[in-house]
Amino acid sequence: MADIKLKNVRKSYGKLEVIKGVDLDIHSGEFMVFVGPSGCGKSTLLRLISGLGDITSGDLYFDDERVNNKVPSERGIAMVFQSYALYPHMKVYDNMAFGMKLLKASKEDIRNRVVKAAEMLQIDHLLDRLPRQLSGGQRQRVAIGRALVRDPRVFLFDEPLSNLDAALRVAMRLEISKLHQTMPDVTKIYVTHDQVEAMTLADRICVLRDGMIEQVGTPEELYEHPNSIFVAGFIGSPKMNFLTDRFSAAFDCHTLGVRAEHIDIVDSDPLWSGKVVHTENLGSDAYIYLDIGAEEPLNVRLKEPRPIALNAEIGVRPQDGHLYRFEDRGHPLPER
């Protein structure tokens, strides 16, 4: 078990400051996900926690122990990388056992842990194969198993699913979610650019922007109560609609936000109306894009998938209680 605390943590490369004073508490056993756009510092922050990067200033604590100067092997962490990082000449068993062999564990202890981890990840039938004989999903399971056998206090994931195709990503999300449930005492920190992974895996999400924390909260809190226009636009798929000028002025704000699922198509008394310029049928969901004269087409989720022709004239009305009002600096305004 490990509570992790970051106090005014900064990281600079020469004059370039990448992490700009991060304060964050990660609770023991929690699944914390770092998200943010490319270059926001999420992978750098993970490396600082792991010990693979040096902290320029500030303090990092595991429980109440300051670990700034401890090497990764002394922190009780295990890390899973995007690239798998498996030894190509070693069989699966030896890849998973390698770290424990370096720690001089007994052969019996190594075998027990490797077999247990392999069974948990359903790769016990692959222990005699080489990495080149495995699929991408199987290789990632081996990489996770190699980390598992070390019995870590903290599990770190650096975009582990980004090399997999869509179907495998879904399957591996389920595996990682089950892993979290079977290891409730192990703290897990996960870096991703995929907000679907963040929303489905996280106990809490930390949204980073330009080396600073924008907001920390549960997936529901970030989705329903974003504390900035940045978070409102980043969390949620499809992204929130933003309207300005005459559309927002009618609601006494600089920018008006509304999500696609909170807009109703109406036959009479529409608030906005326009022409359908694009449609998307995703099977279970369908969307239309409506040109209402705003800067961008308005994205509307259909409550019941139905054929709507391009260039059709449609009237819509946003649902009461689901409008987000922002002032000119991007901070939220209270509901009217």
Image (cartoon, rainbow, N blue to C red):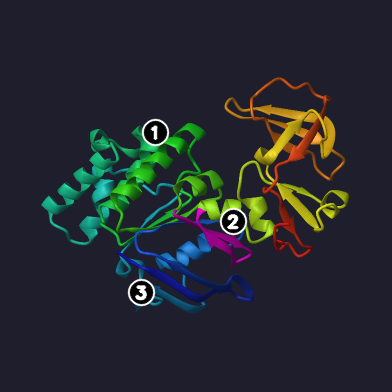
Residue 214: mark in rendering: none
Q: Is there any visible trace of residue 91 in the rendered image?
A: no
- Tell me which corner region of the image, top left, top right, bottom left or bottom right, holds residue 269: top right
- The answer to which of marks 1 and 2 sits earlier in the sequence is 2
In the image, residue 176 lies at what x, y percent? 38, 45
- The answer to which of marks 2 and 3 sits earlier in the sequence is 2
The C terminus sits in image quarter: bottom right
Residue found 82% across the figure and 36% down from its top: 270
Find out whether residue 299 is within the magenta segment. Answer: no
The N terminus sits in image quarter: bottom left
- Residue that badge 2 annotates: 36
Of residue 270 and residue 67, the one placed in the foreground of this image is 270
Of residue 142 and residue 318, the one placed in the foreground of this image is 318
Of residue 281 and residue 217, the one placed in the foreground of this image is 217
Residue 135: mark in rendering: 1
| Region rendered in magenta | 203-218
Instruction: Sort mark 1 into few (<14), some (14-19) or many (20+) by Cα contacts within 10 Å.
Output: few
Residue found 49% across the figure and 79% down from its top: 58
For label 2, the SS is: loop
Instruction: Sort mark 2 into few (<14), some (14-19) or many (20+) by Cα contacts within 10 Å.
Output: many
Q: Amino acid at mark 2?
A: Gly
In the depicted structure, whether residue 72 falls above or below residue 139: below
Instruction: Sort mark 3 into few (<14), some (14-19) or many (20+) by Cα contacts within 10 Å.
Output: few
Residue 70: mark in rendering: 3
Q: Amino acid at mark 1?
A: Ser
In the image, residue 63 lies at what x, y percent? 34, 72
Q: Which numbered mark, 2 or 3, is in the foreground of this view?
A: 2
Residue found 81% across the figure and 53% down from its top: 251
For label 1, the SS is: loop
Left or right relative to 325: residue 144: left
Of residue 88 and residue 181, the one placed in the foreground of this image is 181
- The answer to which of marks 3 and 1 sits earlier in the sequence is 3
